[in-house]
């Protein structure tokens, strides 16, 4: 089966799909509005399935890769859901303790794509930890659609506390040298920005991918250098960037920002047609170089 890319879809349809996965339109609304693109024997339901993730494409680093040690662990979240679970991946044979990187998933729980990102960062030499915000509801349920529905049931403030607890836990882990960075995607990108605001003495570098921005008045609390990745066609998220950048400049914060030409929201996720191989590879290279610079200095 041919692997589809964003070039195979009308931009209006891609934008409509983005609205659907972020809860701005219902499944029924998506099917009704996408029907005009269902040509050549396709149905609207088939279009929705084609735009969704295919996790057979997700694994760049196998779980049993000898370069890493991967396991699921529990951690305490006393101000959140009490007990949480996440995916901890360490580099094999590392000499001494290494910097940690917290990986925060999208609005659908700890899916195979995010687990693979954790393994990639461990191959790069970091102690990576990817919590699952769906732990209190049984964890990631196996599909992104069900995962989105579950995550909508969680209290946003409680989830923030769960991710803050994860950063604190990772900093204190015996494999970590106490220096922690954070990266995240979509919802997780917004949460990476939030942790930079809320945990300035723990988060030493933050790399949000197409994440919602904090309020300008919260920017003075940020101490960590930031590397911000945006997709050119992601009008929904990009609308908040000018005010964020103005606040970063006004308060003398250290940041780098890149807008990747021709890309859509989710361009790093290699399981969907919105994936852009070239942009994702460049963003990942920049991310690892950034973490090496700020977490190992």
Image (cartoon, rainbow, N blue to C red):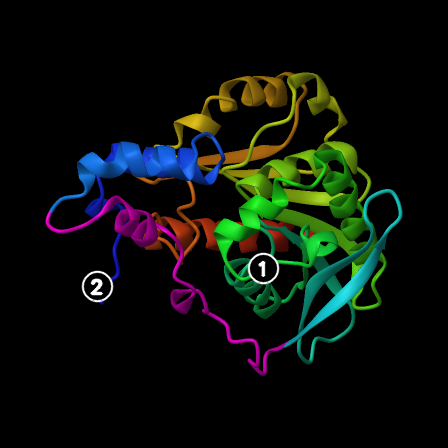
Above or below — where is 215 with respect to 124?
Answer: above
Q: Which mark is residue 141?
A: 1
Residue 284: % across, % down: 48, 54
Above or below — where is 252 with respect to 206?
Answer: above
- The front one of 215 and 13 is 13
Image quadrant occupied by the N terminus: bottom left
Residue 197: % across, % down: 73, 32
Residue at screen point 59% across, 79% down: 67
Dot 1 falls on a residue whose secondary structure is loop
Q: Residue at label 2?
A: 2
Q: Earlier in the sequence, mark 1 or mark 2?
A: 2
Residue 297 visible in the shown view:
no
Tell me the magenta residue range: 40-68
Residue 249: % across, % down: 60, 20
Instruction: Indicate yes or no whether the magenta region holds residue 47.
Output: yes
Q: Does residue 246 appear left or right of residue 55 in this picture?
A: right
Dot 2 falls on a residue whose secondary structure is loop
Residue at screen point 19% across, 35% down: 36
Q: Residues within 10 Å of mark 2 (few under 14, many from 20)?
A: few
Residue at screen point 66% across, 41% down: 153
Q: Residues within 10 Å of mark 1 (few under 14, many from 20)?
A: some
Q: Does residue 67 appear left or right of residue 14 in this picture?
A: right
**Is label 1 or label 2 in front?**
1
Instruction: Indicate yes or no whether the magenta region holds residue 41.
Output: yes
């Amino acid at each position: 089966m041919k692997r589809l890319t964003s070039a195979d879809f009308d931009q209006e349809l891609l934008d409509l799909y983005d609205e659907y996965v972020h809860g701005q339109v219902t499944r029924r609304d998506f099917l009704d509005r996408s029907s005009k693109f269902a040509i050549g024997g396709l149905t609207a339901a088939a279009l929705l399935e084609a735009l969704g993730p295919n996790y057979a494409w997700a694994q760049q680093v196998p779980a049993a890769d000898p370069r890493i040690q991967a396991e699921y662990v529990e951690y305490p979240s006393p101000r959140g859901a009490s007990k949480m679970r996440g995916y901890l991946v360490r580099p094999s044979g590392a000499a001494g303790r290494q910097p940690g990187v917290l990986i925060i998933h999208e609005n659908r729980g700890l899916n195979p794509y995010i687990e693979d990102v954790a393994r990639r960062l461990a191959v790069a030499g970091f102690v990576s930890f990817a919590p699952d915000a769906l732990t209190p509801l049984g964890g990631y349920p196996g599909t992104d659609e069900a995962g989105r529905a579950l995550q909508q049931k969680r209290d946003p403030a409680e989830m923030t506390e769960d991710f803050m607890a994860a950063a604190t836990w990772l900093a204190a882990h015996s494999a970590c040298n106490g220096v922690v960075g954070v990266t995240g995607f979509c919802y997780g990108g917004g949460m990476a920005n939030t942790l930079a605001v809320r945990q300035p003495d723990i988060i030493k570098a933050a790399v949000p991918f197409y994440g919602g921005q904090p309020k300008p008045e919260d920017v003075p609390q940020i101490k960590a250098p930031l590397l911000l990745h945006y997709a050119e066609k992601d009008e929904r998220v990009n609308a908040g960037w000018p005010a964020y950048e103005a606040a970063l400049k006004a308060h003398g914060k250290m940041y780098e920002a890149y807008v990747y030409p021709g890309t859509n929201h989710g361009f790093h996720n290699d399981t969907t047609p919105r994936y852009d191989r070239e942009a994702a590879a460049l963003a990942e290279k920049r991310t690892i170089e950034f973490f090496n610079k700020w977490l190992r200095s």
